[in-house]
Amino acid sequence: MLFTPSDIKVEVTIIRADGTKDLLGTVSLFNQGKQDDHSINEPSQE
Amino acid sequence: MITVLTNQVRNSLAASVLGSGSLSIHPGYIQWGTGSGNASGTDETLFNPVQNRVACSVNQTTTTTSGDTVLISGTITSTGTQSITNVGLFNVSGSSAVGYLTSSVSPYDTIINVSGYANFPNTYPFDVQILSEVMTVTTGTAGSWTVARNTNGSSRTLNVIPSTTQVVGGNNTANGSMFLKTSFGGGAILNAGDALQFKISLQFI
């Protein structure tokens, strides 16, 4: 194989107007549904 | 959270690797939407796009070996209280044309009636997306289009699509081409001044 994308990741973070941040979720295209760190309404553990 | 590379980008990436083409969709702008639906590779645009597109920073960076990653990042700030359900990455800064059905559409109809007709191109063909189905408009007159159904690999909508359903411009419109789309199942509820930051990394080995 000439060319293998090893991973494509999307990370979404909410930044509230007061500056607080909360990770909304991350997802890897090559592991669909397996690497979600947080569901949409689940508070971040960070 | 669901993220997909669009069919168009998959084709373009594969062609560029084989030397038979080049990547024709250079991602650089993000926009979000408030409509419902799950992102699919056949999508050409957002579910109910709102607010203007925002330019992203696009850089070649290193994750494992030198320069192995394209990192795209951008932040959109909400202008009011809204529930964001989907985000798309596009190659142009312009926004999608939007119209609304003025009559319902049955599963095998090939004539659709649309308001906001003037927002769309007056040359054919061009694509529109209604819910998750892409249709190619082949000809038309004011307020009425002839369409090919379930194009770009999308599935035909098997229920009657109600009047007033939103019609969004797809390929060959000001929409440009969508590189990637993410949908959130429950929506992210934002107030004015809240923002979403997106970091998209494409790493190659």
Image (cartoon, grey):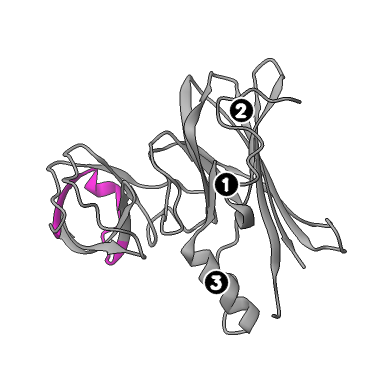
Tell me, for residue B12, which label it has, or none. 3
Tag 1: Cα neighbours inside 10 Å, few (<14), some, or many (≥20)?
A: some
Specify the subunit that label 2 lies on: B
Residue at the location (47% across, 48% down)?
B94
Kindly identify which numbered label has been placed on residue A33.
1
> Would you call the spot at circle 3 few (<14 residues within 10 Å), some (14-19), or many (20 or more)?
some
Q: Quadrant of the N terminus of chain B?
A: top right
Q: Is residue B7 above or below residue B113?
A: below
The C terminus of chain B appears in which quarter of the rendering?
bottom right
Q: Is residue B50 above or below residue B63?
A: above
Q: Residue B90 in the image: x percent, y percent?
A: 53, 53
- The answer, for residue B142, to whether it is visible in the render is no
Residue B84, how many percent across, how many down? 48, 31
Residue type, label 2:
Ala
Q: CA distance from mark 1 to mark 2?
A: 24 Å
**Given contact means CB atoms under 8 Å apart, are the residues at marks 1 and 3 in contact?**
no
Q: Is residue B99 magenta?
A: no
Q: Earlier in the sequence, mark 3 or mark 2?
A: 3
Give the CA distance from mark 1 to mark 3.
Answer: 25 Å
Tag 1, which secondary structure? loop
Q: Chain of mark 1?
A: A
Numbered range of the magenta stretch: B110-126
Mark number, residue B195: 2
- Residue type at tag 3: Ser
> Which type of secondary structure does the marked residue at label 3 adopt?
helix
Front: mark 1 or 2: 1
Residue B111 shown in magenta: yes
